[in-house]
Amino acid sequence: MPALVLIPLLLVLPQLVHGGGWELVGQFAMAAVQPSLDPVVIQSVISGLGTTVSMALLGWAGSMVLGVGLGVASSRTVWRTVLGHGAPAELIRKLLAIPRSIHELLWGLLLLQLVGLEPVVAVVAIAIPFGALVARVVSDLIDALPTGNLNALRAAGAPAGPALITALGPPLLPQLLSYSSYRLECALRSATLLGVFGLGGLGTELRLTLQSLNFKELWSGLWVLLAAMVLLETLLGWLRQRWSMPNRFTPKVMVSGRQGRELVALGAALIPLLVWIAQSQQIDPGALLHWQALPPMGPPHWAELAGLNWPSLVGNTIVLTGLAAALAVGGAPLLLLLVAAWPLGKLLVRGIWLLARLWPPPLTALLLLFVLKPGVPTAALALGFHNLGILGRLLLECADTADRAPEQALTSGGTGPRMALLYGRFSALARPYLAYGAYRADVILRESVVVGLVGATGLGSQLLEALSSFAWDQLLALVAVYAALTLLGEDLSDRARHQLLETSHGCDQSQEVGGAWR
């Protein structure tokens, strides 16, 4: 049903098409099989990838440290064990909702204005919102654990701290490790996105080559980034399998002694690696304390703030989010159904979705501007394509691990491959898949800021304009409205997800609170 949004989009797109860039699109496609192999280009790409991976690793590590600490501090179970009631947890959760609601791009651009182009900016821009998100997931995971052992230890006289660690630590650790691996993949994509907006790394190289129409050099960077993404996903998948980490579809497990020793060894090796990376990239946390001179803020211009077309800004943002979410949620099952009878179709779709995941939405938007006029539909296509890759991978993982007996029974009865796939496997996955789609819509709302450069005339576009012109009163007002809107969307998506999962027994068995889904 979400794929029905294609009908109005197909009616609108002919009005947006212009004939100026089809030749450039052809050159872009041809360059995919003819990337530049110039040693200077390859060296620059590898150097940019090293910077991007470094920012991702450091930002991910910082977010996990922040997230675990704040997650424990915002757990109702922890506070009830310590104080007897969970009121402090509710307060901390509400405070953490503010940094979580602001996209990492906004954090990066704000810090860029305050401290200048420092390497630490990208790291902190990832660590703050990711840390707040990890905290929410960790607290939900802790609160979802059974408390029978904890109550027994407390009744036997064990102090609160040791009792919490002993009773909740072992069952929490595998889920935390599994979730942390997914966040590392997200951190790599976010580091690339921040580079697109001038914070260094491979993203900067990709944007400059696209703007200068050096498509061969652009594809050199894309293929290297693709190889890095595949390597990371393969490595994390192997580690999850080796350490028996729970994924979206397996029951919860405990860490064995051998696995525990390997984890300790990996953690011991990771700390000096992160220190070396920070030193090699000249990451100086002290730079955050030295703010550069900014234009004076002055009194707020209430007339200009009131003069902003707030209904249009909010409305366009909501429409953009709805279009992109519907394209992503409905497009993934539709594509799999279309290629169900084509043996090589699934492989082709996998490749397209992998490119969609690593290709930052702003670059997709710039590429679409070669043939489409700027506006909400163009921005929605860019966001929808990126999230289609993420949702498609999830749906494929679900479908590959689902029970095939109903599908085989339908096929044996003479049903076609598409109908058998739809009613045999997809019907059982519908609720958990739509539950994740509800969460992804909330993410898309925050991501709408990254496609403001294509003239989407929403809050994101106005935010970037206010930031570039140092209109601090407008910036604060827009950030406040954006945060309120994203928090409202988060609450609605949570309600929809919980309602969908109440009767679900599909591919969300392992983490009822939605940790792995995030």
Image (cartoon, grey):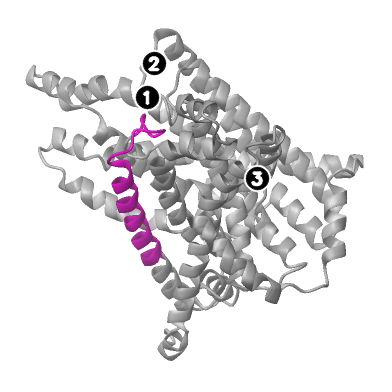
Disc 3 is placed on an element classified as helix
In magenta segment, residue 371: no
Residue 495: image location, x then y, percent: 30, 52
Q: Are marks 2 and 1 in contact (CB under 8 Å)?
A: yes
Residue 112: image location, x then y, percent: 58, 60
Amino acid carrying label 2: it is: Val
| Mark 3 → mark 1, Cα distance in angstroms | 29 Å
Residue 73: image location, x then y, percent: 27, 40
| Residue pictured at 51% horizontal, 33% vertical | 399
Please tell me whether residue 98 is drawn above or below residue 392 in the rendered image.
below
Q: Are marks 3 and 1 in contact (CB under 8 Å)?
A: no
Look at mark 2 in the image and give the residue it sits on.
255
Mark carried by residue 173: 1
Between 171 and 346, the one nearer to me in the picture = 346
Q: Is residue 149 visible?
A: yes
| Residue pictured at 41% horizontal, 52% vertical | 438
| Mark 3 → mark 2, Cα distance in angstroms | 32 Å
Look at mark 3 in the image and give the residue it sits on.
358
Amino acid carrying label 3: it is: Leu
Q: Is residue 184 visible?
A: no
Amino acid carrying label 1: it is: Leu
Q: Quadrant of the C terminus?
A: top left
| Mark 2 → mark 1, Cα distance in angstroms | 8 Å
Residue 500: image location, x then y, percent: 33, 46
Q: Which residues are magenta?
A: 483-511
